[in-house]
Image: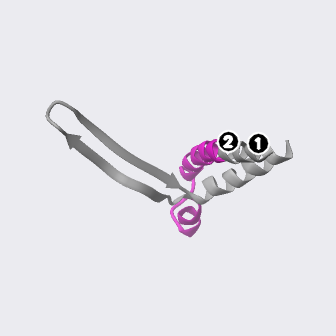
Amino acid sequence: MAKRKLSNVTLGVIIGGIIGSALSYLLSMPFPKGPVKNLFFSALKVGFDTVHVNLGFFNFSLGLGINITLLTVIFIFITIYLLYKL
């Protein structure tokens, strides 16, 4: 039972994050500049910059970044709630 709950939360975060981010991007275009647009569509950037490692014969880059908006968080909670109800 606990495994199912964890998988629902993980799936809810992924699906809700994708839908929320896409809608946030699409809905931010027609909104005029102002406090409402800043509240719903300004992204909080979480992560770290790209790190480049060059060993001469082997090189790689590693970086991670996530942009979180209020609309993304709302859709994550809605998706998790719907997955628990189904």
| Residue 27 picture location, percent across and down | 60, 49
The vertical placement of 47 against 3, above or below, is: below
Most extreme residue toward the bottom is 35
Amino acid on which the number 2 mark rests in the picture: Leu
Horizontally, residue 66 falls left or right of residue 14, namely: left
Colour scheme in the image? one colour
Instruction: Name the one closer to the observer, 17 or 41.
Output: 17
Q: Where's residue 48, x and y in %?
A: 37, 54
Q: Of residues 72 and 55, which is closer to you in this image?
A: 55
Residue 85 at x, y percent in the picture: 85, 46
Q: Dot 1, crowdedness within 10 Å: few (<14), some or many (≥20)? A: few
Quarter containing the C terminus: top right
At label 1, the amino acid type is Arg
- Front: mark 1 or 2: 1
Residue 24 lies in the magenta stretch: yes
The boundaries of the magenta stretch are 13-40
Residue beneath the point at 60% across and 60% down? 70
Residue 8 position within the rendered picture, expressed as x and y whole percent measured from the top left: 73, 44
Which residue in the protein does label 2 denote? 11
Q: Which residue is the extreme one toward the right? A: 85
**Residue at left 78%, top 44%?**
83
In the visual, does 5 lie left or right of 43? right
What is the CA distance from the residue labelled 1 to the residue labelled 2?
10 Å
The numbered disc on residue 4 is 1
Q: Identify the element where label 2 is drawn.
A: helix
Mark 2 closeness class: few <14, some 14–19, many ≥20 residues within 10 Å:
some
Disc 1 or 2, which lies upstream in sequence? Answer: 1
Is the stretch drawn in magenta largely helix, strand or loop? Answer: helix
The quadrant of the picture occupied by the N terminus is top right
